[in-house]
């Protein structure tokens, strides 16, 4: 065997070992679960979830989803307790590693929408077993996970967490706190409707005195301030616009103090002078906006009013059974950009619409409490996104620098400056190595088993056994003679215990 | 001078490559270490940690024993330690809290206190729940009569959060209530405020 062959074998050996070691790796538990072999998948996922490492919280979240779907609440609670412990800790493995390498080399703690789902699930499990104090703690944590955006102007509007807070407070006999939490849930319902209504109303408003760009920039700023403005007056569209103008003015001032790449995504497309010109037209636009809002019939808020009554009744006249029904597949993370450095959270598919629910063949109303995609996509950007973009620029610039230094080394070589040539080449290679080692890719690890929508179905039926149909699944619903029971109907097959409530 | 590879090089090549690659495929081992329960742990947030529970239980027990309500009580005071109620945003193990408090009280009691057992406490809790939900009135409560005092505790927190940091103000409050009169004869609050910030990769 020649030297070349031996060197070839040396280089090939790692590849062969890699292939033999990893190609035969078993399919991931989620794939096994999707194939219908739930027990095997659960066992495999349990093993993954027990191994400490950067993905432990994620693996436990996945395990919890499977366990809930299989009606194994005890296992789900254990898994979620582990995940929540990691999510709430400020310590993190691999944070420094992720500064240079891929973001996914850091310990997974989830994006805010994943955190709030973990808190919500654990809270519901604890509530179902009567541990109302700890359940309440988790609903509060879910609300907190939904605050604190880039602009810090966003007020939590995760309706299921407020609703469950109200119910938990009610269960521990604290009616004022229960009502306060319910008011926040109701305000959030109105906020959604008012934001939708006003976002549409502003679209074709143009102030003649301002340039088209100034108009566009002003409307983008006003829309950025709209959620905060509406949160001040969730049920009063006119007052909400006035508050929005104030919020938008503040936001614009803040944005102008920042480099363009660090501005809000909706304002990044404008130059500094274009944003400055927006100040001149924001107030006239608001005047027209208010005039438009006055023309909107009050009936537009009728749908929230209908849902509000159903929510309030949970406290005033609790139904014997409350179903929380999951519908559709939750948001999906993708990466974009030359180096996959841009994280985007997108819907997994078209809106699945409401679940079809019937009791003894009579259809029941389902009220949408929230869309997880809405929660995931209405929070603005992350600070780490700007960091990843910086890394992408750094990767390019170190590569160019390295290449330039190598070229300069060649020139120095031709000029017989051997020492300088060597130094330039070494520096050039080092720069290229740093470039090669820099990985700006965004972290797309995701808890893909969470739902798109959470729907509320109050069941007011006589005590006893009933035939419950939710989409294509059937359950036996045992309506209690007294008290009120809560049950989560997971979207994943088999959809929880076939008998509700499970005993 | 050139170096000629020998057959021994294969013996080096393959194990070397295996040593480099196999760890990435193999399962990680789980290691356990013992740490001081009062030490800062590797996994911490701004919540209530083991050392907080131990410190509060210890302080509370010694202060309660020094209170006139207990020190001036004629005979041995029978105390029912009720589960600590959680109104914070953190998961709390009520059992750990109650057990530690009970242990600390017994250690400090010197014969002046008797702690009622779990069965009686459970019965008291049931009766309280029935009273709160209006199923019985005060006159029907039986188990309450077995205690001179109830020791109740609750944890509340005020929390704030931004993209970069979190802050939690936690108040753990205890009160001793005369079982017969319903009068609160002693109370004290233990407060802590914790702040934590996320690294740039988590903002």
Image: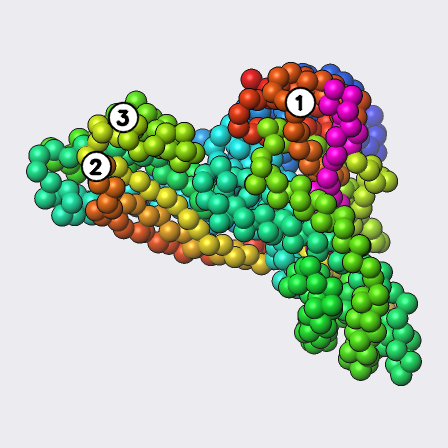
Contact between marks 3 and 1 (CB within 8 A): the answer is no
Q: Are marks 3 and 2 on the same chain?
A: yes
Label annotation for residue B142: 3
In which image quadrant can residue B192 be found? bottom left
* Residue picked out by circle 1: A496
Q: Quadrant of the N terminus of chain A?
A: top right
| A368 magenta-colored | yes
Between circles 2 and 1, the one closer to the viewer is: 2
Percent x, y of residue A301: 76, 54
Circle 3 chain: B
Contact between marks 3 and 2 (CB within 8 A): the answer is no
How far separated are the C-alphas under marks 3 and 2? Answer: 12 Å
In which image quadrant can residue A256 be found? bottom right
Magenta segment boundaries in residue numbering: A355-379
Which residue is at 75% across, 58% downward? A194
Contact between marks 2 and 1 (CB within 8 A): the answer is no
First of labels 3, 2 by sequence position: 3
How far separated are the C-alphas under marks 3 and 1? Answer: 41 Å
Which residue is at 79% across, 74% downward? A286
How far separated are the C-alphas under marks 2 and 1? Answer: 47 Å
Residue neighbourhood size for the residue with mark 1, other residues' Cα within 10 Å, grouped as few (<14), some (14–19), many (≥20): many
Percent x, y of residue B122: 33, 26
Q: In this picture, is B124 found above or below A147?
A: above
* Residue picked out by circle 2: B180
Which residue is at 28% across, 45% downward? B175
Residue neighbourhood size for the residue with mark 2, other residues' Cα within 10 Å, grouped as few (<14), some (14–19), many (≥20): few
């Amino acid at each position: 065997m020649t030297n070349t062959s031996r060197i070839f074998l040396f280089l090939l050996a790692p590849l062969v070992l890699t292939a033999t070691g990893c190609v035969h790796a078993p399919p991931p538990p989620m794939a096994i679960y999707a194939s219908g072999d739930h027990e095997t998948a659960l066992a495999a996922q349990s093993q993954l979830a027990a191994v400490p490492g950067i993905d432990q919280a994620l693996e436990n979240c996945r395990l919890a989803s499977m366990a809930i779907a299989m009606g194994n609440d005890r296992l789900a609670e254990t898994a979620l307790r582990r995940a929540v412990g990691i999510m709430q800790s400020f310590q993190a493995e691999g944070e420094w590693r992720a500064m240079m390498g891929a973001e996914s080399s850091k310990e997974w703690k989830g994006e805010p929408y994943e955190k709030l789902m973990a808190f919500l699930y654990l809270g519901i499990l604890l509530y179902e077993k009567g541990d109302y104090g700890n359940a309440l703690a988790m609903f509060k944590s879910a609300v907190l996970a939904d605050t604190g955006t880039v602009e810090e102007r966003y007020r939590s509007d995760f309706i299921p967490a407020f609703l469950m807070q109200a119910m938990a407070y009610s269960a521990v006999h604290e009616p004022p706190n229960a009502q306060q939490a319910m008011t926040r849930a109701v305000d959030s319902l109105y906020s959604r409707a008012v934001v939708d209504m006003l976002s549409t109303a502003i679209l074709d408003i143009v102030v003649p005195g301002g340039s088209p760009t100034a108009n566009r920039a002003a409307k983008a700023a006003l829309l950025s301030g709209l959620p905060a403005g509406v949160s001040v007056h969730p049920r009063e569209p006119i007052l909400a616009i006035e508050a929005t103008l104030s919020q938008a003015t503040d936001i614009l001032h803040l944005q102008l103090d920042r480099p363009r790449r660090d501005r809000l995504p909706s304002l990044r497309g404008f130059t500094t002078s274009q944003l400055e010109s927006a100040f001149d037209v924001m107030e006239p636009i608001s005047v027209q906006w208010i005039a438009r809002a006055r023309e909107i019939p009050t009936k537009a808020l009728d749908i929230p009013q209908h849902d509000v009554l159903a929510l309030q009744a949970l406290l005033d006249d609790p139904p014997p059974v409350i179903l929380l029904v999951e519908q559709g597949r939750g948001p999906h993370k993708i990466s974009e950009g030359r180096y996959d450095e841009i994280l985007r959270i997108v819907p997994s598919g078209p809106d699945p619409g409401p679940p079809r629910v019937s009791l003894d063949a009579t259809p029941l109303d389902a009220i949408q409490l929230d869309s997880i995609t809405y929660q995931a996509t209405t929070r603005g950007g992350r600070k780490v996104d700007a960091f990843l973009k910086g890394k992408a620029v750094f990767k390019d610039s170190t590569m160019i620098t390295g290449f330039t230094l190598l070229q300069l080394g060649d020139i120095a070589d031709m000029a017989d400056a051997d020492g300088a040539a060597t130094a330039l080449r070494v520096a050039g290679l080092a720069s290229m190595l740093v470039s090669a080692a820099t990985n700006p890719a965004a972290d797309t690890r995701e808890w893909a088993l969470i739902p798109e929508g959470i729907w509320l179905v109050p069941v007011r039926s006589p005590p006893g056994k009933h035939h419950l149909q939710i989409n294509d699944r059937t359950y036996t619903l045992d309506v209690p003679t007294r008290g009120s029971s809560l049950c989560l109907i997971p979207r994943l097959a088999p959809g929880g215990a076939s008998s509700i409530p499970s005993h | 001078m050139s170096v000629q590879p020998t057959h021994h090089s294969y013996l080096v090549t393959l194990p070397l490559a295996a040593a480099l690659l196999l760890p990435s495929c193999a399962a990680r081992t789980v290691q356990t270490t013992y740490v001081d329960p009062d030490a800062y742990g590797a996994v911490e947030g701004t919540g209530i940690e083991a050392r907080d529970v131990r410190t509060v239980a210890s302080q509370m027990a010694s202060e309660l024993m020094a209170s006139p309500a207990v020190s001036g009580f004629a005979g041995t005071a029978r105390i029912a330690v009720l589960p600590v109620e959680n109104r914070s945003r953190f998961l709390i193990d009520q059992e750990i809290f109650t057990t530690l408090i009970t242990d600390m009280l017994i250690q400090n009691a010197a014969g002046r206190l008797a702690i009622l057992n779990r069965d009686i406490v459970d019965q008291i809790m049931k009766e309280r729940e029935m009273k709160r939900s209006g199923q019985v009135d005060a006159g029907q409560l039986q188990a309450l009569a077995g205690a001179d005092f109830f020791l109740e505790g609750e944890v509340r927190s005020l929390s704030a959060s931004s993209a970069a940091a979190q802050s939690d103000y936690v108040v753990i409050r205890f009160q001793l209530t005369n079982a017969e009169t319903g009068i609160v004869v002693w109370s004290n609050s233990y407060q802590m405020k914790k702040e934590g910030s996320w690294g740039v990769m988590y903002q």
